[in-house]
Amino acid sequence: MSPRIVPGAVGGDGDDSDDKEKEEEAERERQEAIREAEERRKEKHRKMEEEREKMRQEIRDKYKIPKKEEMVEQQQQEPDNPLMRKKKTPEELAAEAELEDQDEFTKLKNTIETQVNELKSQIESKCVMQ
């Protein structure tokens, strides 16, 4: 009786390299499909935004409203790929952490001040000067 080959069985006959190659190829195809879908989505949204901008411009022309240039600047600042954005330096990270700590400190300070004022008003209401 010859041994039967069962997919996924333990103790295979060395086809692991073929399986890995197939898996890598499938993963590359999957990544390519994801990238293409993302490009199609971006193109679709770009076209929709162009149509909206055309309508906006018609309204601006009709009512003689000047166009704001802020929107263009914001679009230029946004990187195409979020993974390729500029990394923050340790100094920038430390400054952000300090601001967050300062915010927490300010919240704590305000909470304590309100509690002290409440206690003060309670004490003053109980103590009546004659």
Image (tube, rainbow, N blue to C red):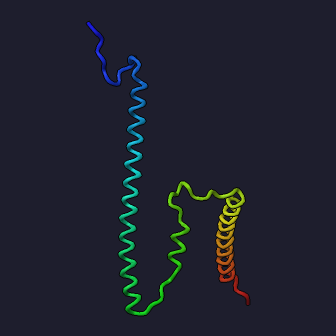
Q: Is residue 116 left or right of residue 31?
A: right
When the figure is inspected, residue 31 is found, relative to residue 102, above or below; the finding is above
Q: Position of residue 64 (x, y in %)?
A: 43, 93
The quarter of the picture where residue 10 lies is top left
Residue at horizontal 50%, vertical 83%? 68
The quarter of the picture where residue 87 lies is bottom right
When the figure is inspected, residue 12 is found, relative to residue 37, above or below; the finding is above
When the figure is inspected, residue 16 is found, relative to residue 47, above or below; the finding is above
Q: Position of residue 71 (x, y in %)?
A: 50, 76
Q: Quadrant of the C terminus?
A: bottom right
The quarter of the picture where residue 47 lies is bottom left
Q: Position of residue 103 (x, y in %)?
A: 65, 68
Q: Position of residue 1 (x, y in %)?
A: 26, 6
Residue at horizontal 54%, vertical 54%? 83
Residue at the farthest left position:
1
Q: Is residue 37 left or right of residue 4?
A: right
Residue at the farthest bottom position:
63
- Number of numbered discs visible in the structure rendering: 0
Residue at horizontal 42%, vertical 31%? 21
Residue at horizontal 38%, vertical 66%? 45
Q: Is residue 106 left or right of residue 40?
A: right
